[in-house]
Image: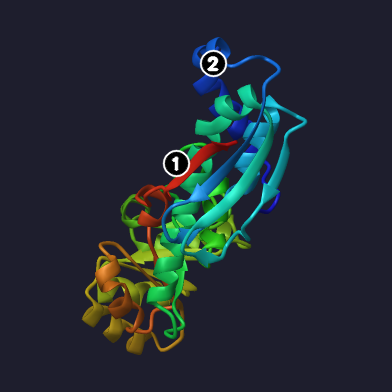
C-alpha cells in the first residue's frame, strides 16, 4: 500500500470513534500485561488491500506490536491467512474492529474493481472510479481502485473539469461552458457530459478532448464511437451494471466509470482469532 497522507488521521479518528474513553470489555476482562498472538484470515475470494491501515490501528495501541504479512496486496486470491499480530492482548482486542473495518472496506473496493476489470478484459476499455466515495476516505478508496486494476478519475473538483448538465444550463450552452473553462484553467483536462448526439456534435465542435456519454444505450454509444472516430476520448457512465459492462465496453468507448466501485462494494469477509 503506497504512502497515503490521510491514513494516520483516518486510523486515529476511527479508533477514537470506537474506543472513546476506553474499551470497557477488554479492560475489565484482560490483564494489562497479557500477551497474545492473533491472525486475520480472508474468508472469501477477493483482493486484499489496506494492510497499512490495519497495521497502523494495532501500532497506535501497541507501538511494539510485531506484524507479519502473509499476502501480497493487489492480487486476487481465494482466501487464507492475511496478517499475524503479536503483542499486547488488550491492544489486539481493542484494535480488532477498526483494523477489520478498514481492511475489509478497502479490500472490498479493490475486489469489486478487479471483477469489473476482468469483465472488460481484451476490449481496451479502462475502468474508472468516481467522486462517489465515503467522506474522509477518498484517498484510500481511490488507492484501492488502483490496487484492483482500475484507473483513477479526477480526485476532486480541483484537478480536472467535468462540465455536467447543470453547468451547461448555468453557462448558457456547451460552447460557452467549454470556452470559459478553457480560458480559466488552460492546463486542466476538460470533459463534457453529453446526453444526445447533438451534445456530442457541439462538444466536438468546440474542441472538448473527452466526452462523457451519460445513460446511453450500447447501440447509441456504438454509433457515437464511429461518428467521433478518435477525435475525443469517450467515457460511458450511468446505469451500467455487471451484466451490461461487457456490452458497453465492446462499443469501443475508452472508459467506463462506475460509482458502485466505491459506494456499493461489499466489504471483503475477514476474521481475527487469537491463537493459542
Q: Give the residue number, with chain letter if any, for mark 1.
A: 134
162 vs 60, nearest the viewer? 60
x and y, in percent, of residue 177 in the image: 42, 59
Is disc 1 surrounded by few (<14), some (14 to 19) or many (20+) residues within 10 Å? few
x and y, in percent, of residue 211 in the image: 40, 71
Callout count: 2
| Residue pictured at 43% horizontal, 80% vertical | 121
Which residue sits furthest front? 276
Left or right: where 186 falls relative to 244 = right
x and y, in percent, of residue 162 in the image: 45, 58
Q: Give the residue number, with chain letter if any, for mark 2.
A: 23
User: Considering the numbered disc 1 on the image, is that residue within a helix, a strand or a loop?
Assistant: loop
| Residue pictured at 51% horizontal, 66% vertical | 76
| Residue pictured at 41% horizontal, 89% vertical | 229
One can see residue 105 in this view: yes
x and y, in percent, of residue 261 in the image: 40, 56
Labels 2, 1: front one: 2
One can see residue 6 in this view: no
148 vs 95, nearest the viewer? 95
Is disc 2 surrounded by few (<14), some (14 to 19) or many (20+) residues within 10 Å? some
| Residue pictured at 61% horizontal, 30% vertical | 92
Rendering colour mode: rainbow
Left or right: where 266 falls relative to 210 = left
Q: Quadrant of the C terminus?
A: top right
Label 2 vs 1, first from the N-terminus:
2
Q: CA distance from mark 2 to mark 1?
A: 26 Å
56 vs 167, nearest the viewer? 56
Which of the 4 image quadrants contains residue 11? top right
Amino acid at each position: 500500500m503506497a504512502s497515503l497522507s490521510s491514513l494516520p488521521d483516518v486510523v486515529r479518528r476511527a479508533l477514537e470513534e470506537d474506543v472513546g474513553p476506553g474499551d470497557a470489555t477488554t479492560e475489565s476482562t484482560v490483564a494489562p500485561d497479557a500477551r497474545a498472538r492473533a491472525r486475520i484470515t480472508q474468508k472469501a475470494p477477493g483482493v486484499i488491500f489496506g494492510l497499512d491501515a490495519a497495521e497502523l490501528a494495532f501500532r497506535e495501541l501497541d507501538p511494539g506490536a510485531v506484524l507479519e504479512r502473509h499476502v501480497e496486496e493487489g492480487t486476487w486470491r481465494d482466501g487464507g491467512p492475511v496478517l499475524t499480530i503479536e503483542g499486547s492482548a488488550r491492544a489486539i482486542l481493542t484494535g480488532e474492529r477498526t483494523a477489520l473495518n478498514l481492511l475489509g472496506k478497502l479490500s472490498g473496493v479493490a475486489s469489486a474493481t478487479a471483477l469489473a476489470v476482468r469483465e472488460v478484459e481484451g476490449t481496451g476499455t479502462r475502468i474508472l472510479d468516481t467522486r462517489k466515495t465515503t467522506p474522509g476516505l477518498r484517498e484510500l478508496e481511490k488507492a484501492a481502485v488502483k490496487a484492483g486494476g482500475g484507473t483513477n478519475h479526477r480526485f476532486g473538483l480541483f484537478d480536472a473539469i467535468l462540465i455536467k448538465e447543470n453547468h451547461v444550463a448555468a453557462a448558457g450552452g456547451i460552447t460557452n461552458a467549454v470556452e470559459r473553462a478553457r480560458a480559466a484553467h488552460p492546463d486542466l483536462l476538460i470533459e463534457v457530459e453529453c446526453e444526445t448526439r447533438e451534445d456530442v456534435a457541439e462538444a466536438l465542435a468546440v474542441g472538448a478532448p473527452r466526452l462523457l456519454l451519460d445513460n446511453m444505450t450500447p447501440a447509441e454509444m456504438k454509433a457515437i464511437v464511429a461518428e467521433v472516430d478518435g477525435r475525443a476520448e469517450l467515457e460511458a457512465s450511468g446505469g451500467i451494471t455487471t451484466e451490461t459492462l461487457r456490452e458497453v465496453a465492446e462499443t469501443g468507448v475508452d472508459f467506463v466509470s462506475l460509482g458502485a466501485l466505491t459506494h456499493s462494494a461489499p466489504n471483503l469477509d475477514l476474521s481475527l482469532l487469537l491463537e493459542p
